[in-house]
Amino acid sequence: MRNRGTLDVLRHSRHDWLNRIQLIKANLSLGRLERVNNLIEEIVLEANHESNLTNLHAPTFAECLITFHWEPRLFSLEYEIIGEPVNLSKVDKKLYKWISSLFTDLENAVNKKADNHLFLSLNIEETEVRFFFDINGILEDTDFLTEWLQQQPDGFSVNEKTITAEHSTIQVSFKL
């Protein structure tokens, strides 16, 4: 993970917010009020998920997800947090290493010219966290996912998986 200074973080954050404001402004000037309302709702929802993520007390893991788009990527990432926050501070580094390995492998497996997207849903429960991955795009190599799933560290278990070149869904649970 990259060690970012305060000014670098502020620069990226400002850039993200300016993009959002410009999108709202453009849609306002075109009279697309319904789209403006949708954009605002999306921003609020994303901010709530970001807040829920930071409330898990896993700063390295949270930073990985929040800053994902700050570097050029071959797939986009969207995430949501469902459930009441639990303290994941003791497993922060483990979660970061685990998710980073998936991101790295996925970057190497997707078609570089395709519109690739990963949707990650974290379902937080008292005794476990369930990760739901929905991968859309073009995977040039699906074997990496099978291998990655077979090499889960202690505490992680694969509950479901459907892997194809165009769409894959995976459910992994992590016991707390």
Image: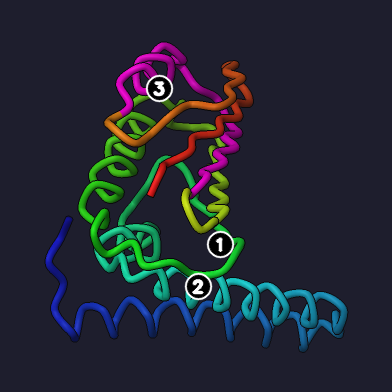
Mark 3 belongs to which amino acid? Leu
Mark 3 vs mark 2: which is more N-terminal? 2
State the image coordinates of residue 52 (x, y, percent, origin top left): 50, 73
Q: Secondary structure at mark 1?
A: strand
* Residue of label 2: 52
Residue of label 3: 149
x then y, percent, for residue 97: 23, 44
Q: Which mark is residue 151?
A: none
Earlier residue among tags 2 and 1: 2
Residue identifier under label 1:
81
What residue is rendered at 77% in x and 88% in y? 29
Residue 105's image quarter? top left
Q: Which region shows up in magenta?
A: 129-152
Which of the 4 image quadrants contains residue 78? Answer: bottom right
Q: Is residue 112 above or below residue 132?
A: above
Residue 29 within the magenta-colored segment of the rendering: no
Distance between the Cα atoms at labels 1 and 3?
A: 22 Å
Secondary element at image label 3: helix
> Badge 1: how crowded within 10 Å, few (<14), some, or many (20+)?
many
> Could you tell me which secondary element the residue under label 2 belongs to?
helix
Q: Residue at x 60, y 34 (%)?
A: 136
Residue 17 rendering spot, x and y as whole percentages? 48, 83
Give the side of residue 68 with respect to residue 37, left or right: left
Above or below: residue 10 compared with residue 111? below
Which three-letter amino acid code belongs to the residue tagged 2?
Asn
Answer with the quarter of the image where residue 59 lies.
bottom left
N-terminal label among 1 and 3:
1
Q: Residues within 10 Å of mark 2 (few under 14, many from 20)?
A: some
Q: Does 137 appear in magenta?
A: yes
- Whether residues under marks 2 and 1 lie with C-beta atoms below 8 angstroms apart, the answer is yes
Disc 2/disc 1 C-alpha distance (Å): 6 Å
Amino acid at the residue labelled 1: Ile
